[in-house]
Image (cartoon, helix red, strand yellow):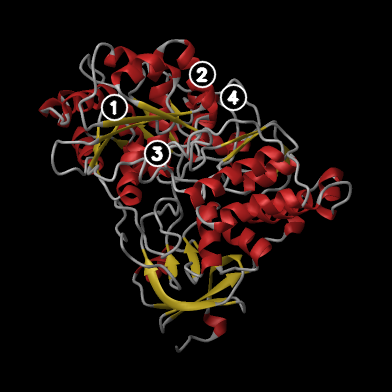
Amino acid sequence: MSHSPANDAQDFGRFLVKGDAQGEIVSTNVPLSFMMGVNAQSGLIQDEHHPLRGTSIQNKILVVPRGRGSCSGSGVIIEMLVNGSAPAAFIFHAREDILTLGVVLAGTMFSKSIPVVMVEDEQTWASLLMGGMAHISTDGYLDINDDTRVHLRNPPDTSQVALSPEDDNMLCGQGCSAATKLAMQTIVSFAAIQGAASLISVSQVHIDACCYAGKVSLAIPQRLRELGGEFAVPTTCNSLDVDRRRWRELKADPELSEASYAIGDHYLAMGAQMSFTCAPYLLDTKPKIGEQVGWGESNAVVFANSVLGARTHKYPDYLEVMVALTGRAPYTGCHLLEERAPKIGIHVPPIFTNEVDESVFPLLGYHIGGLVGSSIPIIYGLETSKPITPDLKAFGAGFATTSSAPMFHIRGITPEAANYDDEIREVEWVNVKIKDLQITWHELNTARDPSADLISLGNPHFTLEEFSTLANLVRGKKIRKGIVMIITTGRSIYDQAERAGYIGEIQRFGASLITDTCWCLLTEPIIPLKAQNIMTNSSKYAHYGPGISRRRFHFGSLAGCVEVACFGFRSAANLRPPWLFDE
């Protein structure tokens, strides 16, 4: 490869993680979630909705603007680095936290690393999107094909992060476990990458790093426990891959189940609460407005920031574990009031008529997330929609699937939206069009015929209000023979629903319930081998499900799901709801 003279190189890039790499460029201008979007064993992109679906990124220079969706992407890239299925390097268009943290931690714990580069210059980015070959050198250069050389600045220096005396003690391992020392070293390194000037104390943590993506997923909590890890603040855990109490009864894969069980045991031994839910905002321990917390799980982060008004960064998997071990976090992102301001405005058309059903919320969240990318939006047009907790949960989960933004504001609904009435004149505004929502509806509905064999409910975990609604919908009815309905929920909500009589009513209908796990982690045989089409009311699962289950999907309302459970197929009004398609 020929190069222009070094002194002609343009200073348009920066190392986030230093290293050498060269190879073929695989490029896209569409953000990518590694969790459920990339196969950790093969290195193939499996997100059915991504333009690079089916492409191998193994040993390639992956050019992607940023990650999106799940916080678990950090765990997936660690697994890929250890397996040898990872890209040769990442080149991002902006600072990217989730995948970068995975590379940092893989280097620290497993001595496996790749360069991570940020290129913000538009002309250089356009050159990268054209493809070809690239070479990244620790000498501080990125060479693109035969004609472009970009100077790369060094990664940020940890000396820029101001530490308290207690932080310094943990960093040096004084008066703490080896696990706490490792945790503080990771936090300080990542705080520098994030540009944080200092650390902040948090009152609680929610650990997303509970799923089993491979042996590394178990090795990390096991190692931290062996190093004497004890959580410094109250800590809850996300969904596991299995129902801890019933995995044998459900005939789940023994190897996966035992590994998943062990992951939970390690966190419990370090002091976590018996929770295992992807909806920690439904627990009595949910944070209050203004409370500084350290949460993982994309939908939970969005709900905490947006609906509860708590303050959390969107923590990559395992960084939140480090925060739990120390009680300290980088003081950056949505921990800071100024970072919570909207950067884009969204106008929603007047669709809230008497005919509209609750599927409008996951649909809108998914659609708006795709519009805003990494920018925090303020949304107008929902003031009269009167959403309840399940609606905001569904909106947030859809939003967090397609966006990398850590929160949203809805005028008249979310607690901080009114703070920005005088500032929104400065932001760009985008109008949501009915025809675009119709396109998104069709994108989520990938089934080729109106039949469905499996009804999937509880992604994120079912709420008490949803149990009440479902019990009323199924009262006096029976599920059609051959159809399976499964609801996933947390133990706390299950117990409340059982006391209220909802569980009995739903079980009489013929549905099954599973706790401790969630749909993004369920596989065969819990998903019946014969099932070809799955019906769900979750836009998150309708997005990820085709890639991870290899089934086609119907997306619609909760009442629509019950209709399919009773008859085995969707009616015309269910397939094309009048509130969306009758103009």
Q: Earlier in the sequence, mark 3 or mark 2?
A: 2
Position of residue 273 measured from the top left corner of the image (x, y, whole percent):
65, 31
Residue 192, by quadrant, is: bottom right
Q: Earlier in the sequence, mark 1 or mark 4?
A: 4
Q: Earlier in the sequence, mark 4 or mark 2?
A: 4
Q: Can you see residue 207?
A: yes
Position of residue 75 measured from the top left corner of the image (x, y, whole percent):
54, 54
The amino acid sitting under disc 4 is: Lys
Q: Earlier in the sequence, mark 4 or mark 3?
A: 4
Q: Can you see residue 330?
A: no
How far, Cα to Cα, is label 3 from label 2?
20 Å
How far, Cα to Cα, is label 4 from label 2?
18 Å
The amino acid sitting under disc 3 is: Trp
- Viewed as shown, does residue 347 lie left or right of 333? left
Contact (Cβ within 8 Å) of mark 1 with mark 3: no
Q: Could you tell me which secondary element the residue under label 3 belongs to?
A: helix
